[in-house]
Image (spheres, grey):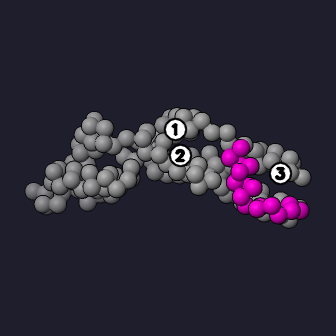
């Protein structure tokens, strides 16, 4: 016999309350509902997906958009989505549908960081490390740093 808070109806209600606040990946939501029986969680999540209330694709697209607004690069976004259990094909599709020029994004982030300051060698090194931690590919960072040198 299951406890009152772990019935399929209670698990579904809790999942819907969580989804009402923000999008979750299936993996994230299943971890939030961990106190229930695994087969109950699977059934509830399958129902939510069938009803369109839970979508890894929608979650990925929303997260890509938010992370772009924060000035993050494709590698960081990709890693964050993978850590949240999103399938690599969905991640690739979400990054592709964002339709963003990553070199332009990198230049915007770099300009914001520099704020008009001169860029000597030590400053270039700091900027390069900053851009790498933001998730931009090393080749793209190198190309940008050669352009501003």
Residue highlighted by disc 2 = 64
Residue 138 can be seen in this image? no
Q: Is residue 111 left or right of residue 11?
A: right
Which image quadrant is residue 44 in?
top left
**Residue depicted at x 43% and y 45%:** 59
Query: Are the residues flagged by discs 3 and 2 in contact, CB closer than 8 Å?
Result: no
Q: Earlier in the sequence, mark 3 or mark 1?
A: 1
- Quadrant position of residue 42: top left
Q: Earlier in the sequence, mark 3 or mark 2?
A: 2
| Neighbours of disc 3 within 10 Å: few (<14), some (14-19), many (20+) | some
Neighbour tally class for label 2: few under 14, some 14-19, many 20 plus, Cα within 10 Å = many
**Gap between marks 3 and 2 measured at Cα:** 25 Å
Of residues 96 and 35, the one drawn nearer to the viewer in this rendering: 96
Disc 3 to disc 1, C-alpha distance: 28 Å
Q: Secondary structure at mark 2?
A: helix
Instruction: Read off the magenta span.
Output: 104-120
- Of residues 145 and 101, which is closer to you in this image? 101
Which quarter of the image is occupied by the N terminus?
Answer: bottom left
Disc 1 target residue: 94
Q: Secondary structure at mark 3?
A: helix
Q: Position of residue 68 (x, y in %)?
A: 59, 49
3D distance between C-alphas at marks 2 and 1: 7 Å
What residue is drawn where x is 53% and y is 46%?
A: 65
Eyeballing the image, is 97 above or below 45? above
Find out whether the residues at labels 2 and 1 contact each other: C-beta distance under 8 Å.
Answer: yes
- Residue 145's tag is 3
Magenta region, main secondary structure: helix
């Amino acid at each position: 016999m299951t406890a009152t808070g772990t019935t399929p109806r209670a698990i579904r209600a809790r999942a819907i309350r969580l989804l009402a606040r923000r999008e979750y990946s299936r993996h994230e939501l299943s971890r939030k509902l961990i106190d229930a029986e695994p087969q109950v969680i699977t059934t509830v999540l399958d129902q939510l997906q069938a009803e369109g209330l839970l979508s890894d694709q929608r979650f990925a697209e929303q997260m890509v958009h938010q992370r772009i607004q924060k000035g993050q690069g494709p590698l960081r976004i990709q890693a964050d989505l993978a850590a949240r259990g999103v399938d690599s094909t969905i991640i690739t599709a979400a990054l592709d549908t964002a339709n963003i020029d990553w070199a332009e994004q990198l230049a915007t982030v770099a300009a914001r960081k520099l704020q008009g300051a001169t860029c000597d060698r030590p400053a270039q090194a700091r900027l390069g490390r900053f851009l790498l931690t933001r998730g931009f590919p090393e080749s793209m960072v190198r190309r940008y740093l050669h352009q501003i040198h």
